[in-house]
Every structure is written in C-alpha cells, then in structure tokens.
Image (spheres, helix red, strand yellow):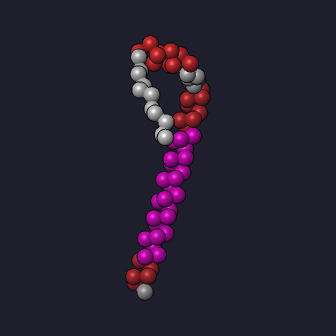
Amino acid sequence: MAKEKKDRVYSPAGVIRELKTVKWPTFKELMSTSGMVILFTLLFGVYFFICELVASGLINFIVKA
C-alpha cells in the first residue's frame, strides 16, 4: 500500500523559524559565486557562438559545393 502523504501546513511562525536556521552567504561569498556564474555564462556564450560560426560555415561550404 502506498504511503499516505501528510497535509503540510505552513504557518508564519514555522516559516520564520526555518529561515533562522538557513546559513545565508556573506557578501564576499555572494560576489564570488555571482562572478563565477557570470564568467561561465559568458564562456558558454562564446563557445556556442563559435560553434554556430563553424556550423554555418560548414553548411555554406556543403551547399556551395
């Protein structure tokens, strides 16, 4: 028999208590991880741009040949 799900009740006091247990990042950690996200986003953008150039050049070469 399947387990029965408990009805979840989210009270404001329970939410606040849970938020107090969260380890919030420091400003330095936040800037570091945000910088990494931005850097990798840019790197992936450049990578896909180069792939697009190569693919379109290859297709143009095949069509013209």
Q: Is residue 10 above or below residue 50?
A: above
Residue 9 sits inside the magenta stretch: no
Place of residue 32 in the rendered image (x, y in percent of width and height, measured from the top left)? 59, 33
Determine the residue positioned at 45% across, 73% down: 57
Q: Which quadrant, please, contains the C terminus?
A: bottom left
Q: Is residue 27 above or below residue 42?
A: above
| Furthest residue toward top | 13
Determine the residue positioned at 45% across, 64% down: 52
Towards the viewer: 9 or 33 = 9
Place of residue 4 in the rendered image (x, y in percent of width and height, measured from the top left)? 46, 33
Task: From the image, give the main secondary structure of the stretch colored magenta.
Answer: helix
- Specify the quadrant of the image occupied by residue 8: top left
| Furthest residue toward front | 1
Towards the viewer: 44 or 18 = 18
- Specify the quadrant of the image occupied by residue 26: top right
Q: Is residue 56 above or below residue 30?
A: below
Determine the residue positioned at 43% across, 71% down: 56
Towards the viewer: 5 or 35 = 5
Q: How many dots with numbers? A: 0
Q: Is residue 6 above or below residue 13?
A: below
The span shown in magenta is: 36-59
Place of residue 40 in the rendered image (x, y in percent of width and height, measured from the top left)? 55, 46
Place of residue 16 in the rendered image (x, y in percent of width and height, measured from the top left)? 47, 15
Determine the residue positioned at 45% across, 32% down: 5
Residue 45 sits inside the magenta stretch: yes
